[in-house]
Image (cartoon, grey):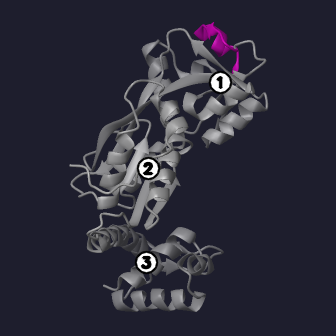
């Protein structure tokens, strides 16, 4: 099967547009249309519904898309291996997905430094909620994922990556600032939450359950999808939120936000590395993990320190055993 046709088809599905797919691939729109039509002719089925404002896959197209992404990932791994030179310098492409917690700081800095020291390597970091990252790794659309909570799955494996602390963020002038408050006090304050599927939300739900409480016992009227969204809402004075401490470290230092503790809740989490079960790691992935683990400690607060000191790293020239 022609992988160029599959790549064109997958890009149209992801961009929901022939013109945007063409721009992403660096080719003309007619070229993309020809590739997709040739694929449909070969398979003998309509793969895309072009009748609406956006192009969407048909039922057959969705099935093909899932398999095509796996095939393209395997092709990329093969090309990566074939490109490996005797000099040990990294090249190829590394695709990682992450939830907003790790993606917002530590992970991004590690990836930037790795790429800077290995100019031939292309790095792509995509940000989704925890459940979506796990699903995309499971379907081999991403090679690696970094998330803040674990789910039961036979198709992926999890391993600890680094530890994070979750705090209650509030405006610097808020009555909670710098205090340890009781759950009853928190119930009197408007609480802003991330959307369902977010790792921080899942951890808080578990902590509340252990304390004999539930989210519905609190004043939750705002559920916002992104970590940056909840932080912006707190900065605007619309309530308080549970959030990764690493994500608000610059705001704490600048004095625009403050943190509080809630008696009976100790929300810490291990950010977890996610891999597809049985999938051999590419050379770029193994090298990144070796590089990152040398700079991330297991104790709480290490992620913040790593973000501040991840400079002067030598080029990666080997593969972790």
Q: Is residue 144 above or below residue 23?
A: above
Mark positioned earlier in the residue sequence (3 or 1):
3
Residue in view at x 50 percent, y 57 percent: 116
Residue in view at x 46 percent, y 88 percent: 35
Is residue 252 magenta-colored?
Answer: no
As drawn, the label of residue 133 is 2
Question: Residue 132 at what x, y percent from top left?
Answer: 45, 50
Closer to the eye: label 1 or 2: 1
Question: Residue 8 at what x, y percent from top left?
Answer: 47, 80
Magenta stretch, residue numbers: 177-190
Mark positioned earlier in the residue sequence (2 or 3):
3
For the N terminus, which image quadrant?
bottom left
**Mark 3 surroundings: few (<14), some (14-19) or many (≥20) residues within 10 A:** many
Asked whether the beta carbons under mark 1 and mark 2 sit within 8 Å of each other, the answer is no
Real-space Cα distance between discs 1 and 2?
A: 25 Å
As drawn, the label of residue 7 is 3
């Amino acid at each position: 099967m022609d992988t160029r046709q599959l790549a064109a088809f997958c890009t149209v599905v992801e961009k929901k547009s022939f013109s945007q797919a063409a721009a992403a691939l660096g080719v003309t729109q007619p070229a993309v249309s020809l590739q997709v039509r040739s694929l449909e002719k070969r398979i003998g089925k309509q793969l895309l519904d072009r009748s609406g404002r956006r192009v969407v896959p048909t039922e057959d197209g969705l099935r093909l898309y899932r398999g095509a992404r796996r095939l393209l990932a395997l092709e990329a791994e093969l090309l990566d291996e074939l490109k490996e030179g005797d000099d040990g310098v990294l090249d190829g492409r590394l695709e990682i997905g992450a939830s907003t917690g790790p993606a917002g700081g530590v992970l991004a800095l590690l990836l930037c430094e790795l790429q800077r020291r290995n100019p031939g390597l292309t790095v792509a970091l995509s940000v989704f909620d925890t459940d979506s990252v796990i699903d995309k790794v499971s379907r081999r659309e991403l090679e690696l994922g970094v998330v803040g909570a674990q789910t039961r799955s036979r198709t992926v494996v999890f391993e600890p990556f680094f530890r994070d602390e979750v705090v209650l963020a509030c405006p610097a002038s808020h009555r909670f600032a710098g205090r340890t408050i009781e759950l009853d006090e928190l119930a009197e304050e408007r609480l802003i939450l991330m959307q369902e599927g977010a790792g921080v939300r899942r951890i808080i739900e578990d902590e509340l359950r252990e304390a004999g409480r539930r989210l519905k016992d609190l004043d939750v009227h705002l559920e916002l999808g992104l970590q940056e969204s909840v932080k912006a809402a707190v900065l605007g004075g619309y309530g308080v939120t549970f959030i990764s401490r690493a994500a608000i470290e610059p705001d704490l230092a600048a004095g625009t936000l403050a943190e509080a503790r809630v008696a009976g809740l100790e929300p810490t989490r291990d950010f977890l590395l996610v891999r597809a079960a049985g999938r051999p790691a590419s050379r770029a992935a193994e090298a990144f993990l070796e590089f990152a683990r040398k700079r991330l400690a297991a104790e709480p607060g290490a992620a913040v320190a790593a973000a501040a000191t991840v400079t002067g790293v030598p080029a990666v020239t080997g593969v972790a055993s």
